[in-house]
Each structure stands twice: as structure tokens, then as C-alpha cells.
Amino acid sequence: MTLINMQFYANTLQQTVTISVILPEPRSSDQVSLTATEWPYMILLHGLGMNQSDIIRKTSIERYATATQMAIILPSLGRSCYLDSPSFPAWQFLTTELMPRVTATFKLSTNLADCFIAGISMGGYGALRWGLIEPKRFRGIGVISGAVNYFNFPTTILETLPPYRELINQQNMIPVDLDDLLTSELTSSVYRVWHSR
């Protein structure tokens, strides 16, 4: 298992960011060279109050990466709700700058069948929003305990997210009834693990 922690200056955010990349343990000698392998990959988004290291330390993601022979891309974007604010355009970074930076360093597959997006809680919101806005970008969307309806969140939680409370009202593109948005084409590609929010 190869775990790389990358830091680079993000032009969209105008600051240095940290992301982690997990590359699976090669199963054969011809996979040993990173440049010889086009890994399928999953972008995995962390939840509120977490960063990418929480997922690595507290889950079995490394074992799953090897089992599926899939690279895992773990950006760290704080309490951004994966939305753009005037001082921190997290959505712009996520959707336009993240993968060009990663693919410039690692040889990842460009085949739609090999690209996935998933997230936990707040990250589930970001994953579902990105996957539904760009349905041809990913083969599948994974949502784990997704915080997809911020309108029903307790005020005590929303008050910890300024200025995101107003941004959620302005930019939210996920209706309360997700089934209204999930077409028959998309439904089979959305993997949901819910608990009440």
C-alpha cells in the first residue's frame, strides 16, 4: 500500500492545500511501476469536522483500495460544505483543479467506467451534488450518511457554518425528495447508505 500526502498551491483557493492519495498494493509485477498502471479511482470526500486523515486512520479504506485495485483521492476542504464562498471557492477547486493536479502526478484512468465519487456526511452532500450535476463524469456515486438536506439541520449546527448557511440556500441543487432528481439512468449508479439526518 502506498500512501502519499501531497501539498501544493491551489490557484483557485490562493492557498496551499493538502490531499492524500492511496495507491493499492500491486497484485502482479507488471503493476509495480506506477507509471505503467492506469488506476481506476474514487474521490472520497470527508465529513464536517473531519479531514482526509480521519478517513485513513478510522476506516479500512486502505484494505478496500487493495481489494478493488482502486486509487483513492482524499482532498481536505475543511468545513466548506463543498460550496464556493467569496474567500474559499471550494466547489471550484474540487470540480476544476483537483483532478488535473492529481493526474499530472499519478497515472489514473480516464475511462468513465473507472471513475467514482463518494463522501461521508457533508462529503456525501458534495459527492451527490457533483455526481448529479455532472452525471457523465462518474460511473457511480456513493453517499454514506449523507447530509443532503441542510434545510432540516438544527440551527446550532448551521450557525457553525457561516457564511455557508446562506450559500446553501443560494447554491443548493439537491431537493428534499432525491427521487425527483434521480432518473432511471442515474438511480442504478447511486449507492446510498443512509441514517436519519
Image (spheres, grey):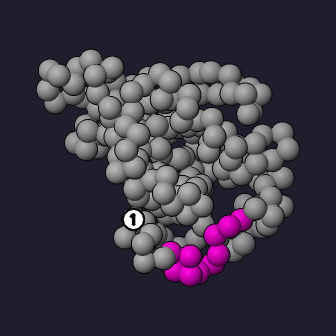
Image location of residue 168, percent across then percent down:
76, 62
| Viewer-proximal residue among 108 and 178 | 108
Q: Please state, as top left, top right, bottom left or bottom right, where the C terminus lies in the image.
A: bottom right
State how many labels appear.
1
Q: Residue at x 56, y 57 (%)?
A: 134
Most distant residue in the left direction: 28
Horizontally, residue 29 falls left or right of residue 49, namely: left
Does the magenta segment cover residue 127?
Answer: no
| Residue 39, image quadrant | top left
Q: Residue at x 50, y 75 (%)?
A: 182
Query: Please, is residue 57 above or below residue 84 in the view?
Result: above
* Residue type (three-letter) at the residue carrying disc 1: Ser
Of the pair 28 and 19, the residue shown nearer to us: 28
Q: Which residue is mark 1?
A: 189
User: Circle 1 — which element?
Assistant: loop
Q: Vertically, is 138 above or below 17?
A: below
- Give residue 194's position: percent from left, percent from top: 46, 69
- Location of residue 9 in the rendering, given as x and y in whole percent from the top left corner: 68, 22
Lateral position of residue 124 relative to residue 32, left or right: right
**The image quarter in which residue 122 lies:** bottom right
Image coordinates of residue 52 in percent, x first then y, are: 52, 37
Up-down relation of residue 162 to residue 180 (above or below):
above
Q: Is residue 156 visible?
A: no
Residue lying at 40% horizontally and 49% vertically, measured from the top left: 112
Q: Residue at x 81, y 47 (%)?
A: 85
**Residue 90: quarter of image:** top right
Q: Give the magenta-colored segment's residue range.
A: 172-182
Please tell me which residue lies in front, 89 or 164. 89
Magenta highlight: main SS: loop
Residue 174: in magenta span:
yes
Q: Quadrant of the N terminus?
A: top left
